[in-house]
Amino acid sequence: MSKTVRARPEVERREEAAVPPVAARSTKTPLGWWRNPWRRPHILATATWMYLAWSLLPVLIAIAISFNSGRSNSIWQGFSTQWWWGHPSFDPSGALFVSPELHAALIQSPVFKGTLKSGLTFPAKETTGTEITVEDVKGINWELDVSDSKELSESAKKFNGKIAAATGNLEVRPGQFRKLRFLIKVTSLKG
């Protein structure tokens, strides 16, 4: 290889004709706005907000009506919490947090799935002897009350150490050794 580097020969370039500038499409016209792919999604945003209003407005109206002091759903008769906590001058049995039937409906039939353990003992008999533990939820064991049915008691013994699903009413009680006891009055038990 030689130490001298040869220069490249000059390449003859044609002069390119100047390209006339293309007039930009106006986005002010409706058609120009529609053709712009980088426009803001006004139609999608409008449809989304209309759907949210259509689906949430009835819920907000129902919540507002629940604070009406009268029985009418169409005439506002004043602010009251009688449908939530009861009213002393009226019959409080129709209030959500006073009526046992309505209160039970709030916590009716949740399904608890986890590893079932039966035959447990705890000091001062503060356990039903059967509980469901979920590995993802640390520190919470749901005690199962299966004392009302011999069939449920036998099912609990059969599913001991296995994954099971319990359905029933949930009660939260204070405990002596545990701060809170989560007790499920079992209506069905499946493995």
Image (cartoon, grey):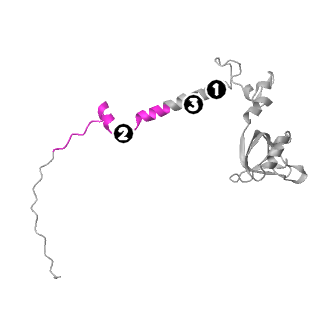
Q: Which mark is residue 47?
A: none
Give 148 or 15, whichever is nearer the viewer.
Answer: 148
Q: Earlier in the sequence, mark 2 or mark 3?
A: 2
**Mark closest to the chain's N terminus, 1 or 2:** 2
Amino acid type indicated by mark 2: Arg
Q: Which amino acid lies under the numbered mark 3 shown in the image of this protein?
A: Leu
- Label total for image: 3
Residue 62: mark: 1
- Look at the numbered disc 1 and give the secondary structure of its residue: helix
Residue plotted at (76% across, 53% down)? 161
Disc number placed over residue 39 in the picture, else none: 2
Q: Which residues are magenta?
A: 20-49
* Drawn side of residue 71 relative to residue 32, left or right: right
What residue sits right under mark 3 in the picture? 56
Tag 1 and tag 2, C-beta contact below 8 Å: no
- Tell me, yes or no, if residue 37 can be seen here: yes
- Residue pictured at 80% horizontal, 45% vertical: 155
Q: Find residue 70 and report its horizontal and vertical position in percent.
A: 71, 19
Residues at badges 1 and 3 in contact (C-beta under 8 Å)? Answer: no
Q: Is residue 28 left or right of residue 183?
A: left
- Residue at the extreme right: 124
| Secondary structure at numbered mark 3 | helix
Name which residue lies at 43% across and 35% down: 44
* Kind of residue indicated by mark 1: Ala
Residue 46 on image: x %, y %: 45, 32
